[in-house]
Amino acid sequence: MTTTDDLRSQSALTRRLVWAGFREMLPIALFVLVFGAAFGLASLQQGLNTPWAVLMSSAVFAGAAQFAVLDLWGPQVPLLPLALTVFAINARHLLMGATLYPWLRQLPPARRYGVMALASDSNWALAMQALGRGQPGLGLLLGGGLALWVFWIIGTVLGTQVGSLIADARRWGLDMVMGCFLLAMVVGGEKNLRMLLIWVAAGGASIAAWHWLPENSHVVTGTLAGGLLGLLWKEKSDER
């Protein structure tokens, strides 16, 4: 049975835990640097200068959304389509926050939102895996997020200078790194029929949306499908 004391213990946010999260995320952060460089180069090609590209990476910190924005960038920026595109791509963060809420609510609001500002797929998966084992996870979330954020910005700067050297990340198979990492997190996580069917529903809905719905809608579609099934099929618990 999970108690309030257990949740508080798992919500610990010390320098040691944050530094551990930073170090653990470094291997993935090195690949993020490559994609940051690709974004830096692409931003120059779309007419942004280096300061604006770095500012976008620093303030937005959402790779897929930033690349999508570049496709809409020009002398006249269509604000509504741009906002809808970014929301669709990043809608999964709503469910990330929901899955972390039992632990996040143990923190003061300023810390809670500060931690989530650096949440992304990989450090969220790392944190959830630790929390599932009953270990502190928010330090991994924050520290891992800091590593990804720093290397994303460094990559953006490099891309505006020497990005042409690694412009085609797919040629080297680097576009598969994040997917493989997340798959490893899933395989190492909780295993039961409920989780299997949730992932099947999310994956199936995402693939169907990718084939038949507008571009980028597969992200929010898969997220909603898996999230709704998880909401309707509640996990058995001993909590009172």
Image (cartoon, rainbow, N blue to C red):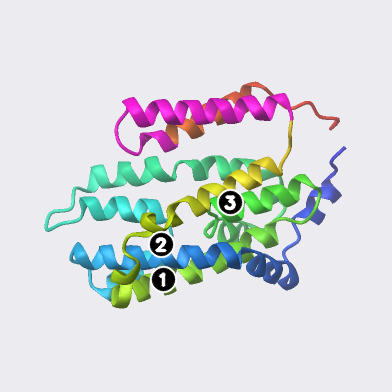
Q: Residue furthest left?
A: 75
Mark drawn on residue 30:
none
Q: Which residues are magenta?
A: 192-219
Q: Pointer 3: what residue? A: 181
**CB atoms of marks 1 and 3 within 8 Å:** no
Quadrant in the picture for the C terminus: top right
Q: Main secondary structure of the magenta part?
A: helix
**CB atoms of marks 1 and 2 within 8 Å:** yes
Q: Is residue 188 left or right of residue 38?
A: right
Q: Pointer 2: what residue? A: 35
**CB atoms of marks 2 and 3 within 8 Å:** no
- Which badge, 1 or 2, comes first in the chain's sequence? 2
Quick check: is 212 in the magenta stretch? yes
User: Local crowd at mark 1 within 10 Å, few (<14), some, or many (≥20)?
Assistant: many
Residue 226 picture location, percent across and down: 55, 29
Gap in Å between the C-alphas at discs 2 and 3? 15 Å
- Which badge, 2 or 3, comes first in the chain's sequence? 2
Q: Mark 3: which secondary structure?
A: helix
Q: Is residue 213 left or right of residue 147?
A: left
Gap in Å between the C-alphas at discs 1 and 2? 7 Å
Residue type marked 1: Gly
